[in-house]
Structure formats: C-alpha cells, structure tokens
Amino acid sequence: MRLRVSRLALVCLVLLSAPLVRAQREKFPEDDLEFIEKTWPNAQKDNMGIRYLVEKPGHGPLPVPGNLVSVLYRGQLLDGTVFDESLDRNRPFTFRVGRELVIQGWDFVIQQMRLGEKRIVIIPAELGYGTRGSPPRIPRNATLVFEMELIDIKRD
C-alpha cells in the first residue's frame, strides 16, 4: 500500500510540474514572449525556440553548411531600435553557412530559407548575443528581430 501511495504521489507531482517544464524550455523572457505573441500572433515556433513569419515564400533547395549566401536584412530590438541593416542589393551581407561567422540563430534560420524568401525572425538572446550583448548597440540578454531576405546561394 505504501508503494502505491508513493507512485501515485510521484505521478501527481510529474503531472503538476509539466507546465513548469514547458516554461523552462521557452527561450524568451516572459515579458518579451508576451510582447512577441501580441505583436506577431501568427508567428511559428521552430525547434530551436525561434519565432518566424514567412512574408514571401522562396523556391529551390535549402542552403547547407559551406554554401555562400547573400542576405538583405534589418536588425532591431523589441522596442523598434534598429541596430544594424544591410538593404542594398548591390552590397548584400554575405557569409558562409555553418562556419560560426554569424550568430547561432542566423546559421539555423538561413538553413530553413529558400532563395527569394523573406521572413520576420525573432531570435532569443541565447541564440543571438547572449548575456554579453554587443555594446553599445545591443544590450545584454536582448531578444532580436530581423527582417531577412535570402537573395543568393552559391554552392561551391
């Protein structure tokens, strides 16, 4: 009888703690998450915890590590402060995928985009600039919002 009570207590404890476990997996602080869900209610969540909206679908194969990609983007904080951008089609931002040349969130997101695709991407701090930030423009633990367009993929 005592063993059954212990198992029942354990099952109840696990079931009651399930919402807490989910909350721990969320990568955005509670205030940021509330703002994100209100501002972008239709944003999808990927398995890394990044939120995104596809504004214009792309076509063709996905980029893979080692590909050279060119991106147009605008990066801003949740309050709308723009901290960086590269919007000139003649001088896009170019980098090799999967070589740790960009923040981890970008390396993950770009491998999910097709040529010509435009997205709004919301990246949690731990996949961005983390606890250090990138002073003076990006504070510590900042959630980042990017408007991104993949305009070229070179598969060398």
Image: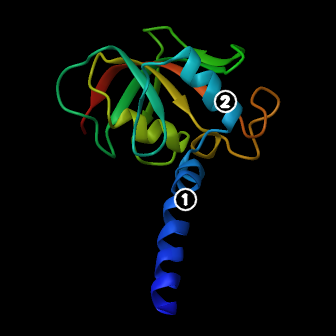
In this view, 143 is above or below 83: below
Instruction: Name the residue: 68% across, 39% down.
Output: 29
Image quarter for residue 123? top right
User: Residue 93: x percent and y percent?
Assistant: 49, 23
Image quarter for residue 103? top right
Image quarter for residue 156? top left
The residue tagged with tag 2: helix, strand or loop?
helix
The residue tagged with tag 1: helix, strand or loop?
helix
Q: Are marks 2 and 1 in contact (CB under 8 Å)?
A: no
The residue nearer to you, when weighing 125 against 15, is: 15
Query: How far, Cα to Cα, is label 2 from label 1?
Result: 25 Å
User: Residue 46: x percent and y percent?
Assistant: 40, 39
Instruction: Name the residue: 78% across, 33% down.
Output: 139
The residue nearer to you, when weighing 98 against 80, is: 80
- For disc 1, the marked residue is 16
Task: Give me the disc on residue 117.
Answer: none
Horizontal placement of 28 versus 97: left or right?
right
- For disc 2, the marked residue is 32
In this view, 117 is above or below 32: above
Residue kind at label 2, given as amino acid type: Asp
Give the mark nearest the N terminus, 2 or 1: 1
